[in-house]
Amino acid sequence: MSLVQLTLAAPRHLEEELVEQFLARPEWASGFTLFEAEGYSRHPESLSAREQVRGRARRVCVQIVLEAEHAHALLSHLKHSLPKPDVAWWLIPVGEFGRLA
């Protein structure tokens, strides 16, 4: 089993839609972590006027540790059901994952 961490960075207004996508597919995303972030992009056309003045955008980040094949299936699904150019994603390998108890 090859584990990866999938991270998605999206505009905050997409948070509930993303959560619904994950909850509807527990076979891919059995658990995830959400946190607020701010992001900078070289593509200011997607920023609101306020964000352009601030120089960064308010984002929500989602992190999920899952099997690599499930990550690719989930990404394929999200690209089809939520084709948003302002949602960034990346995968990194996970050496180990577990619980303390």
Image (cartoon, rainbow, N blue to C red):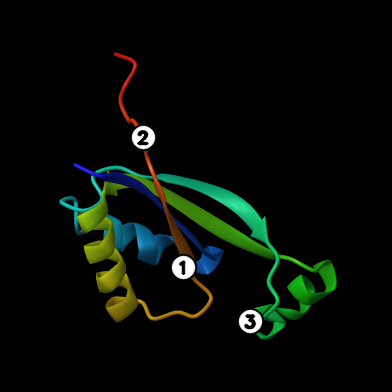
List x then y, in percent, for residue 93.
Answer: 38, 45
Quadrant containing the C terminus is top left
Q: Is residue 43 above or below residue 88?
A: below
Left or right for 38, reference 11 = right
In this rendering, is residue 92 above or below 21? above
Query: Could you classify mark 3 by the number of other residues whose Cα lies within 10 Å: few (under 14), some (14-19), or many (20 or more)?
Result: some
Mark nearest the camera among 3 and 1 is 3
Indicate which disc, 1 or 2, sits on the residue closer to the N terminus: 1
- Which comes before the other along the chain, label 2 or label 3? 3
Q: Which residue is mark 2?
A: 95
Q: CA distance from mark 3 to mark 1?
A: 14 Å
Residue 80, horizontal then vertical, whole percent: 28, 80
Q: Nearer the viewer, residue 90 or 43?
A: 90
Is residue 55 shown above or below 94?
Answer: below
Q: Nearer the N terminus, badge 3 or badge 1?
A: 1
Name which residue type carries label 1. Answer: Leu
Could you give the CA–CA distance between mark 2 and mark 3, rounded to whole angstroms?
Answer: 35 Å
**Horizontal and vertical percent for residue 76?**
27, 72
Verify CB contact (< 8 Å) between mark 3 and mark 1: no
Q: What residue would you read off at disc 1? A: 14
Front disc: 1 or 2: 2
Give the residue type that dot 3 points to.
Ser
Q: Amino acid at mark 2?
A: Gly
Q: Mark 3 = which residue?
A: 46
Q: Secondary structure at mark 2?
A: loop
Where is residue 54, by image quadrant?
A: bottom right
